[in-house]
Every structure is written in structure tokens, then in C-alpha cells.
Image (tube, grey):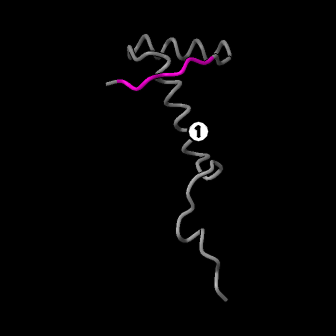
Amino acid sequence: MARKKVSTTIYITPEQNEKLKMLHERTKVPVAVYIREGIDLVLEHYADELPGQLTLERSMPIKK
């Protein structure tokens, strides 16, 4: 079953729009899928900036 999606508005350049349209025409993959994949890549890249549970190594003080 597909996950529920949230509608949002983004603004892209005309060049980005044209390239996404060409990519869609060649692959038949919806543009929205590429945009979601791009967002996932950004979130993965900046994962250390997001709040979350600390690993054991980061949460323990360094003993000297």
C-alpha cells in the first residue's frame, strides 16, 4: 500500500523544469518521484543536523 503524501508547493527554475520533463518523457517516471528522491538525498546528506537519538559513542563523555 502506498504511503500517504502531503501536498506542498515548490518553485524550480525553468531549466530544472525542462530537464525534469525530459527525464519523465524518457523514463515515464513521474516528476514528483524525482523530487521526492532529491529530498531524500538532501535529508540523508544533512542527517547529522536533524534531531534524533544519540549513538552510545556520542552520548558518553570522553574519560581522560
By secondary structure, the bulk of the magenta-drawn segment is best described as loop
Closer to us: 32 or 53:
53
Residue 37, percent from left and from top: 49, 30
SS for callout 1 = helix
Q: Position of residue 43 (x, y in %)?
A: 57, 40
Residue at figure coordinates x 38%, y 17% from the top left? 27
Residue ranking furthest to the bottom: 64
Magenta residues, start to end: 2-8
Residue at x-position 55% and y-position 71%: 57
Q: Quadrant of the N terminus?
A: top left
* Residue 49, magenta (yes or no): no
Q: Position of residue 33 (x, y in %)?
A: 46, 22
Three-letter code, disc 1: Val
Residue with the mark numbered 1: 42
Foreground residue, 5 or 26? 5
Report x, y in % for residue 42: 58, 38
